[in-house]
Image (cartoon, rainbow, N blue to C red):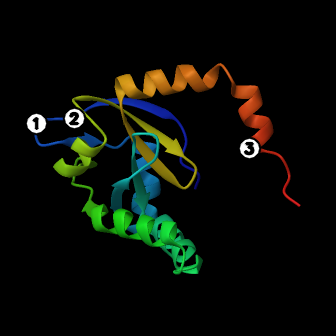
Amino acid sequence: MLLTGSYHRSLDEKLRIAIPKGLRQAIQDDAAGIVYVAPGTDGSLALYPEAAFGRLANQIAEASPTESDVRAFARLFYAQAQRVQTDRQGRIRIPAELAQLANIQREVVLLGVGDHMELWDEQSWSIYRDEKQAHYDEIAEKALKPTK
């Protein structure tokens, strides 16, 4: 199931976030509510259902271990990634060190991004979205250009 949509949420005092029902169902169908929270890109956190995390791990494993960027990414990514479980109310707890890494405060936006989710500080997402949306057509051309 593809994860899509934008959901404005608030973190509680224990850094828990409620996962929207549609996204939560995909997580529960995939791996009984297991999510891996990891450093994302562009100032976000990435939240991977277990199967998507496994596919990413395979992709990293297939990259050349002799390349310094591959080693550095694997170290930084895996050292900070944490496995979390949804609770009975469909919430997950964001590890404090990862929330700090992404400058996540109380108001956040949870995005469905295909095979995973991203968690953004609401203000950071707004700035990013506005900046990129102005160039949507150009970005689409580059992203959807066939590879040979």
Q: Can residue 64 be seen in this view?
A: yes
Q: Is residue 50 above or below residue 128?
A: below
Residue 11 bears which disc, if any? 2
In the rendered image, which quarter is residue 123 located in?
A: top left
Q: Which amino acid, by three-letter code, is at mark 1?
A: Glu
Kind of element beneath mark 3: helix
Q: Which of marks 3 and 1 is nearer the N terminus?
A: 1
Q: Which amino acid, by three-letter code, is at mark 2?
A: Leu
Identify the residue under disc 1.
13
Q: Residues within 10 Å of mark 3 (few under 14, many from 20)?
A: few
Task: Farthest residue to the left: give it.
Answer: 13
Q: Nearer the viewer, mark 2 or mark 3?
A: 3
Q: Residue shown at 86%/52% (left/top)?
A: 146
Q: Dividing the image into 4 quarters, which one contains the C terminus?
A: bottom right
Q: Pointers 2 and 3 in contact (CB under 8 A)?
A: no
Could you tell whether 116 is left or right of 133 in the image?
left
Could you tell whether 104 is left or right of 54 in the image?
left
Q: Which of marks 2 and 3 is nearer the N terminus?
A: 2
Residue 119 location (% of width, % of height): 38, 41
Kind of element beneath mark 1: loop
Q: Is residue 32 visible?
A: no
Identify the residue under disc 3.
143
